[in-house]
Image (spheres, grey):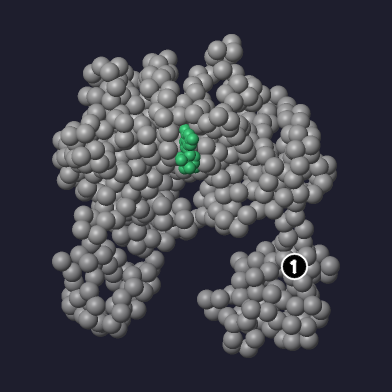
Amino acid sequence: MSVRVHKLAKELGLTSKDLIERLRKLKVDVKGHMSALDDATAEIVRHELEDQMKSPGQKPVLKEPKAKKTLKTLKVHMPLSVKEFSLRLGVKPSELIMRLMSKGHLANINQNLQEDIVRGIAEEYGYNIEKPPSIEEEILEEIRSKEEEGKNVIRPPVVTFMGHVDHGKTSLLDYIRKSNVVKKEKGGITQHIGAYQVKLAKGAVTFLDTPGHEAFTAMRARGANATDVVVLIVAADDGIMPQTIEAIDHSRAAGVPIVVAVNKCDLASANVDKVKKQLSQHDLMSEDWGGKTITIPVSAKTGEGIGNLLEMLLLEAELLELEANPDAHARGIVIEGKLSGGRGVVSTLLVKNGTLRVGDVILSGLHYGRIKAMVDDKGEKIEEAPPSTPVEVLGLSGVPQAGDEFFEVKDEKKAKTLSSLKQTQEKEELLAGKTSRISLDQLYDSIKKGILKELKIILKGDVVGSIEALERSLEGLSTKEISLKVIHSAVGNITESDIMLAIASNALVMGFHVKMEPKAQTTSEKEKVDVRLYNIIYEAIADTKAAMEGMLEPITKDIFQGRAEVRQVFRVSKVGTIAGSYVLKGKIPRNAKARLLRNKKVIFEGKISSLKHFKDDIKEARENFECGIGLQGHDDIKQGDIVEVYIEEKTTRRL
Ligand code: GDP
C-alpha cells in the first residue's frame, strides 16, 4: 500500500508543492506530486507534520526516554532497519529517526543501522542488545550436534599423487583405476569426475584425479584440505628433482603425511637405493632403512608393487585413525564445478562426513540447491554417498568453486537466506578490498596482538649458496614472541605455485636475485600476497628485522603544496565561510590538507571542504590565481590569514 503525495497534501491541508518542500526537510526524497510514499513513511510524515503545524515555527522537542536502571534484554538479528528497530523498541519510527538525527545519524525508515548505533540507542531506552546466533551459526550448530549423535566408523583415506613431471603420476592413477574396474561395469569404461574410489578386500581408497602440488595447494588456498595422504612419486631412474622437493614442501606446509612410491622400477636404469638415499636427505628416511617413511617400489607399466602400495595406504589410514560419522549431516569439499550444456551445473563433491542423499539440500559458498541426481565414478546412478565417496551431483544454483566446502542444510529456506547473505558479504568484502594476509608492514602489529607466533617465508633465489645463507640468517632472527620459518626454498623465479603456497599457508614470499613470473605477479596482486624482491642479502635481513621491531610502520611526512593569502571573506548561507584567496606560491589542490595561520600561529588544521574559481568547483588553484577556499567545519577566517596546504605522504621507515 502507498499514498500519493497530492492526496496526502490534501489530507493535511497543504499544497503538493508545500508538502514536497517539507518532505525534503525531513530527508524524504520524492519527485513530483504524483509520486507515492509507502504506508510507514506516510505515517511518520503525518505524525511529524501534524506536530509541526500545531505549533508552527517551533522545532519538535525530543523527549528524553526514561532509561531504566536495569537493562532488559532485546534479541535482534543484525542488520536491523529503522522500521524493525522502532517496532522492537515500541516507539514510533518518527521518534526513532529524530533520536538518530540528534546523534548525527541520518537514516530513513528502511535503512539498516550499524550495530554500535543500535546498541547505543537501545541502552537509552533501557535495553541491552543480544544477538541470537546468525543463520550460519545455527546451521553449523545443527551440524555439530548431529555429529555428536551416532557412531564414528573408519572411512577410506583420500589420496593425492604428487611429484616431478613425467615421473608417472598420471600413469599410476590410470593403472589403479583400470585394474580395479570390474569388467561388466560399462565394459570397463570409467567416468572422469575428478576423483575415484577403489575397493579392496580390506577397505577402500579414494584418489583425487588431479595430480600435482599446484592443484593440491590451489584447493588449500581456498580453505579446504581434501587430502589425507600424499603419495610422492619419484622415478627410479631420475631421482629427486626440483618439483619433487616442491611437492614435499607443499605437503609438509599442509601437515599431510607422505607415502613414497618409487616408480618405473621395471627400467634397467632404475636405482631404488639411490632414490632412498636422496629421500633421507629430505627427512624421508625409508622404513627398511630405520626411518618412518613408507617407501614402495612400483611400476605403472607392469603393475608391480601397486597392490602393495594400496595396502600400505590402508595401513596409513588406520594409523591416522581416519573416522567419520555416516549418520551426521553431510559435509565435504567441492572437487570440481562446471556448467554443462544440457545438464546445468555439474559438481563433483567429496563427502568427508555424514551421508549425502538425493533430495538433500546443500549449501556451498554462494550457491545452494536440492540434489536432483547423483552419479558415482563408474557412471552409475546412486541414491546415497557415505564418507570419502566422490560423487557428481546436479542441482546447485550456481557453479561452486573447487576447494569450497559444502554442507547439508535441513531447511531450504535457511540455505537460500544464507546464500544471499553470503553474496552480499562477498560483494562488500570485495569493495572493501578486505584481506587478512600477512605482510611485513603489519608484522609488528600481528606480533603485538599475539595473532602471529610464526612467520612463514617462501624463499626463492638464483643460487643454492645464497638461499641457504639467507634461510639461516632469517630463521636466526627468531625471538621468543615469533619464530621465523622458511617453509619452502628453491632456485628459480617466483612462480604461481609459490604464490598459492603463500596464500594457503599465510606466508610471505622473498626473492633474491630473481624475478616474478607474470602469472605469479597477477595472482599476488589480486590476492594481496606480500612479495619482496632483494638484490642484497643484508637488505632482506634488515627489512625483516625492522618489521619485527615495528620499525617498518609507515611514518607520515607533510609535503608542502602551496600558500594562499585570504583577501576577502564571504559568508555563504548553508555552506559557511569561504576564504577568497590569492595563491602566493605553489598550488592549492582540492584534496589536500590545510593549515590556517594568523600572525604565524596555526588556528586550524584539517581538510579543505570546497575549492572554487568564481562559481565553478575546481580540482586545483595555481600560483597567482584567485580561488575560494572552504575549510571543513571551520568558519573563523579573517582577511590577512594565510592558508598553507600540504599532502601527507606515508613512507616506510628503514633501519
Ligand atoms: P606425470 O607427468 O608424472 O603424470 O607422468 P606420466 O604418467 O605422464 O608418465 C610420463 C612418462 O613415463 C610416460 O611416457 C609414461 O609412459 C612413462 N611411465 C610412467 N610410469 C612408468 C613406469 O612405471 N615404467 C616405465 N617404463 N615408464 C613409465
Residue identified by numbered label 1? 646
Residue 53 is left or right of residue 276, and the answer is left
Residue 2 is left or right of residue 575, and the answer is left
Pick the quarter of the image with the N terminus: bottom left
| Any part of residue 159 in sight | yes
Relative image position of residue 80 (x, y in whole percent) = 33, 50
* As drawn, 528 above or below 473: below
Tally of numbered tags: 1
* As drawn, 231 above or below 213: above
| Any part of residue 546 in sight | no
Write the residue at 67% across / 64% down: 606
Residue 269 is left or right of residue 334, and the answer is right
Relative image position of residue 358 (x, y in whole percent) = 16, 39
Write the residue at 84% across / 67% down: 600
- Of residue 626 and residue 460, the one placed in the foreground of this image is 460
Figure quadrant of residue 469: top right
Q: Secondary structure at mark 1?
A: strand
Task: Name the amino acid type tagged 1.
Answer: Tyr
Figure quadrant of residue 185: top left
Q: Residues within 10 Å of mark 1 (few under 14, many from 20)?
A: many
Residue at the far front in the pictured view: 268
Relative image position of residue 291 (x, y in whole percent) = 58, 14
